[in-house]
Amino acid sequence: MADLFDVSVPVFLRYLSNLDAILDKTAEHLQHQGTEQAEVLNLALQPNMFPLKWQVRIALGFSIRAINPVLQQPIMLDDGPIDSIEDIRLLLGSTIARLRSVSRRDFAGGEARLVREKAGQAVFEARAVDFVTQYALPNFFFHLGMAYSILRLAGCPIGKGDFDGFHQYEAGVNLVAEAQPQLQPLMQRLPG
């Protein structure tokens, strides 16, 4: 049976490794397009949403915010500037190193610990297992998904397979065009 370690640390490491590969593609794309990194790092989906650099920082922070309370360690987040993809890589590297330093043994008995953490302007209090699975993991994926969406908006040639590492498609496949006939009846029922 999977334990709290299994559903957190390896999951974070997998998706952070995928993010590292996405950053490779992003840097290459921006260089090829002649786009300044700062332009994309400061891009947001909406004016009242965080830009890319903050979406990534927050996602990385949630991986640490997930494990440190279980280990009864203070949450220390890197607040250095993010002005380049290299700055993100440095933050990503230190986050991955921190996660790799944690062992299953470190989690022993931690599932039942009470965790109290700020959730925006609210306070979330739960057993560690619930904190990780119902709060930290969903927030990690939310912010990682926002970062992915911003990069897609910026024209970066990434896909679902880059995000999850599982999906594979032939070059040039357009799933939207292929799904259009099946979606048409649904689209006609939607308002506006």
Image: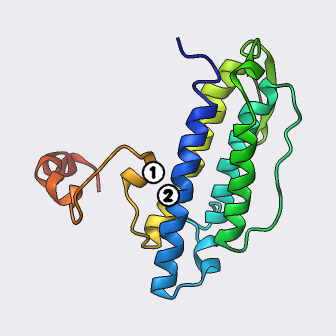
> Eyeballing the image, is 53 above or below 138?
below
Q: Is residue 32 visible?
A: yes
Q: Which mark is residue 146?
A: none
Q: Which residue is mark 2?
A: 148
Label count reads: 2
> Which residue is located at x 71 percent, y 33 percent?
66
Horizontal side, residue 185 vs residue 58: left or right: left
Rendered-image quadrant of the C terminus: bottom left
Are there few (<14), some (14-19), or many (20+) residues within 10 Å of tag 1? many
> Which residue is located at x 17 percent, y 60 percent?
177
Whole-Å distance between the Cαs marked 2 and 1? 7 Å
Q: Position of residue 145 (x, y in %)?
A: 51, 51
Q: Amino acid at mark 2?
A: Tyr
Q: Position of residue 143 (x, y in %)?
A: 59, 50
Q: Relative to the observer, which residue lies in front, 88 or 175?
A: 88
Q: Relative to the observer, which residue lies in front, 186 or 105?
A: 105
* Secondary structure found at label 2: helix
Q: Which residue is mark 1?
A: 163
The answer to which of marks 2 and 1 sits earlier in the sequence is: 2
Asked if marks 2 and 1 touch (Cβ < 8 Å), the reply is yes
Q: Amino acid at mark 1?
A: Phe
Horizontal side, residue 171 vs residue 16: left or right: left
* Secondary structure found at label 1: helix
